[in-house]
């Protein structure tokens, strides 16, 4: 059985504190302290209303080496919740839709987050209901509280690492055209929070509409299932640009400039934005807010990402950022 594609984004963020409340230890040191105090998976378990049970599922074998970046995998799941099943081999003319609970001391896993932490800098890749690094920060605050670390250690937030040179170039030169590229694979996923009405949400809604249209054209159920498994093979590209060249109305030009800023800050994880400035420079969304889109494969017969494959991508992105002089600036 072919491993299904999964398109994810790695976010580069920093743990920040108010200047007068920053602990003397680095963020990675604080997490190592918490993990030494909480040595097992169950010790790290926290119940969060919107996520269920959340805990540190895996620690890289070098997790306690201060000279190496710390890599951990966080999981979230619904413990004890019965899920209805389909009697695929039922011989009766009725299926009882019998509920099944997870095995004893297990939970139905709903989400993952993969982290690489180096001093106060983090690379974060999430999957499932752990949407975005905000949910990860919420869990880590609870982890610090569980380990009884001082209150000032918990008073952090994550801010995206930004390439200010690229941002200034975009602000000064303005937008000649803006290209949005993505696949239909995640078009049905909701944006984090679900309330923001920006260009990112409109872009996702457009692809969802294209996806629905293509699905309607396929009437055979078996073929529809095949199509559903291959949405990642369908590329969608659209270009937004002010018409009229030098004579373009200023308000039209400024609205496109604003849209470009909106997209580089809020671009969906399964998409890419490429901006060509009016001076001819090309800027990609991942070069302003430092992110990287990666193509992964889920495990065979499972909906899970492969932890070691994700950790490999985190290492590669960190190496790229170091080579570009963008790491820990």
Image (tube, helix red, strand yellow):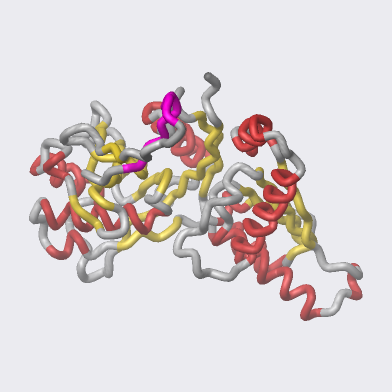
Judged left or right of residue 148, residue 82 is: right
Instruction: Quadrant for residue 72, please give it.
Output: top left
Q: Position of residue 43 (x, y in %)?
A: 12, 42
Is any part of residue 309 visible from this angle? no
Q: Residue at x 37, y 55 (%)?
A: 14
Q: Position of residue 264 (x, y in %)?
A: 60, 59
The answer to whether residue 277 is above or below residue 30 is below
Judged left or right of residue 242, residue 188 is: left
In front here: 123 or 53?
A: 53
Instruction: Quadrant for residue 110, please give it.
Output: top left
The answer to whether residue 243 is above or below residue 275 is below
Taking the magenta stretch, the answer to whether it contains residue 84 is yes
Dominant secondary structure of the residues highlighted in magenta in the image: loop
In front here: 185 or 68?
A: 185
Counting labels gives 0
Instruction: Quadrant for residue 38, please give it.
Output: top left
Taking the magenta stretch, the answer to whether it contains residue 309 is no
Judged left or right of residue 184, residue 163 is: left
Q: Residue at x 16, y 64 (%)?
A: 152
Q: Position of residue 268 (x, y in %)?
A: 56, 54
The answer to whether residue 160 is above or below residue 252 is above
In front here: 191 or 261?
A: 191
Q: Residue furthest front?
A: 93
Q: Which residues are magenta?
A: 83-92
Is any part of residue 77 visible from this angle? yes
Q: Residue at x 61, y 53 (%)?
A: 285
Q: Residue at x 37, y 50 (%)?
A: 130
């Amino acid at each position: 059985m072919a491993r299904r594609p999964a398109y994810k984004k790695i976010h580069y963020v920093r743990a920040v504190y108010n200047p007068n409340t920053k602990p003397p230890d680095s963020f990675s040191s604080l997490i190592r302290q918490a993990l030494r105090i909480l040595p097992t998976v169950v010790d790290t378990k926290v119940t969060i209303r919107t996520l269920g049970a959340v805990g540190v599922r895996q620690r890289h074998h070098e997790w306690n080496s201060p000279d190496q970046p710390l890599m951990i995998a966080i999981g979230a799941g619904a413990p004890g919740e019965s899920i209805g099943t389909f009697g695929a081999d039922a011989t009766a003319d009725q299926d009882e839709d019998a509920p099944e609970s997870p095995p004893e001391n297990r939970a139905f896993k709903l989400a993952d987050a993969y982290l690489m932490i180096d001093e106060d800098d983090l690379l974060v890749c999430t999957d499932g209901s752990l949407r975005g690094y905000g949910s990860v920060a919420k869990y880590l605050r609870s982890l610090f509280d569980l380990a009884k670390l001082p209150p000032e250690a918990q008073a952090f937030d994550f801010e995206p690492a930004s390439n200010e040179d690229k941002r200034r170039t975009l602000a000064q030169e303005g937008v000649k055209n803006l290209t949005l590229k993505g696949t239909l694979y995640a078009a049905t996923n909701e944006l984090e929070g679900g309330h923001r009405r920006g260009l990112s949400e409109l872009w996702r809604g457009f692809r969802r509409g294209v996806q629905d249209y293509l699905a309607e054209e396929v009437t055979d159920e078996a073929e529809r299932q095949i199509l559903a498994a291959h949405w990642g093979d369908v590329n969608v590209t659209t270009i937004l640009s002010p018409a009229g060249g030098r004579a373009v109305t200023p308000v039209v030009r400024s609205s496109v400039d604003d849209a470009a800023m909106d997209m580089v800050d809020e671009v969906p994880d399964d998409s890419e934005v490429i901006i060509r400035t009016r001076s001819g420079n090309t800027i990609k969304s991942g070069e302003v807010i430092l992110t990287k889109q990666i193509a992964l494969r889920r495990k065979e017969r499972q909906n899970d990402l492969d932890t070691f494959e994700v950790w490999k991508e985190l290492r590669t992105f960190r190496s790229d950022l170091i080579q570009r002089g963008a790491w820990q600036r």
